[in-house]
């Protein structure tokens, strides 16, 4: 049976594959759409195996919130050209929608879930897209937060996104300001108490070494180290950071202007940019 342009167009809409891939699959399957789809999917599996050692450093990062739950996903690929492709972005959005609908505990669980369209798993969606583009792809990141209120922020370009959880309902613009703060200033924790002891020890030792090199006496090194770690907290913990929109305020003070009990309980930040 001769393959028609209408057949090719229909299979292309079903699979997202290129015209020639659809034509070849239809010819091989004698115009059976189900068999043709399987041929295209097997091609994706073969390409994925062949390119498994390649680096997927580009991609698309998306985030959203739904009530008390917010999530970020990053689908990774090899080139910026593919990362900006509408079908690749749509696939990433479908993965994010699946995460929001199911609230999986980790990335592996998300990959195994059936996507929101009810057809393929998230992992199979990615493999199918590999067959279309010929590039290595992977589910690079999945992060989530939960709280009385949540917010998400996607930086223009789909390379950086943040999510933030709060202890109580919060005005959307205030929440968005905090999410943008996380994007801009890259804090490592909400509070100083959440900074790991290994980081504290390292920062203090760096401060001591700098003081020794500057000829400071040993008797004051601990005081210098303690001052350095307080500055580190101010620069790197979210609630102590200067608010980027008003340096006269810390983030904690900004939140307390809205509600004396309002605070951040968690945040996540995912970026594919080199920083």
Image: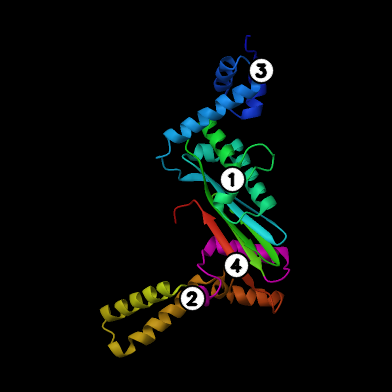
Q: Disc 1 versus disc 4: distance between alpha carbons?
A: 26 Å
Crowding near pointer 4: few (<14 within 10 Å), some, many (20+)?
A: some
Mark nearer the viewer, 3 or 1: 1
- Which residue is the site of mark 3? 7
Residue nearest the viewer, comparing 49 with 243: 49
| The residue stretch that appears in magenta | 167-194
Mark nearer the viewer, 1 or 2: 1
- Which residue is the site of mark 4? 266
Q: Quadrant of residue 212?
A: bottom left
Q: Quadrant of residue 245?
A: bottom right
Task: Give the mark, 4 or 3, whose residue is nearer the N terminus.
Answer: 3
In magenta segment, residue 152: no
Crowding near pointer 2: few (<14 within 10 Å), some, many (20+)?
A: many
Query: Is label 4 in a helix, a strand or a loop?
Result: strand
Q: Residue 227: horizontal and vertical position, in percent?
A: 42, 82
In magenta segment, residue 191: yes
For residue 112, the mark is 1
Task: Give the mark, 3 or 1, whose residue is nearer the N terminus.
Answer: 3
Q: Disc 2 versus disc 3: distance between alpha carbons?
A: 62 Å
Q: Residue 56: horizontal and vertical position, in percent?
A: 45, 43
* Quarter of the image where the N terminus is located: top right
């Amino acid at each position: 049976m001769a393959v028609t342009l209408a057949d090719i167009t229909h299979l292309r809409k079903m699979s997202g594959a290129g015209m020639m891939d659809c034509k070849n699959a239809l010819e091989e399957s004698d115009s059976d759409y189900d068999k043709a789809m399987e041929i295209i999917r097997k091609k994706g599996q073969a390409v994925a195996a062949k390119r498994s050692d390649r680096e997927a450093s580009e991609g698309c990062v998306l985030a959203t919130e739904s009530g008390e739950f917010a999530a970020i996903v990053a689908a990774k690929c090899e080139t910026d050209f593919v990362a900006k492709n509408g079908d690749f972005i749509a696939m990433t959005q479908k993965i994010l929608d699946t995460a929001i609908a199911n609230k999986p505990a980790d990335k592996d669980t998300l990959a195994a879930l059936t996507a929101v369209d009810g057809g393929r798993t998230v992992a199979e969606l990615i493999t199918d897209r590999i067959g279309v583009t010929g590039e290595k792809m992977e589910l690079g990141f999945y992060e989530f937060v939960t709280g009385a209120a949540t917010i998400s922020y996607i930086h223009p370009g789909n390379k950086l996104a943040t999510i933030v959880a709060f202890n109580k309902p919060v005005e959307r613009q205030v929440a968005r300001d905090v999410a943008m703060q996380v994007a801009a200033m890259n804090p490592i924790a909400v509070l100083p108490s959440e900074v790991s002891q290994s980081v504290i020890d390292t920062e203090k030792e760096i401060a001591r070494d700098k003081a020794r090199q500057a000829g400071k006496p040993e008797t004051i090194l601990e005081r210098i180290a303690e001052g350095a770690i307080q500055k580190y907290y101010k620069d790197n913990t979210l609630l102590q950071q200067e608010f980027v929109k008003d340096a006269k305020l810390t983030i904690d003070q900004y939140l307390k202007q809205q509600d004396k009990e309002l605070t951040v309980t968690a945040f996540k930040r995912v970026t594919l940019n080199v920083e």
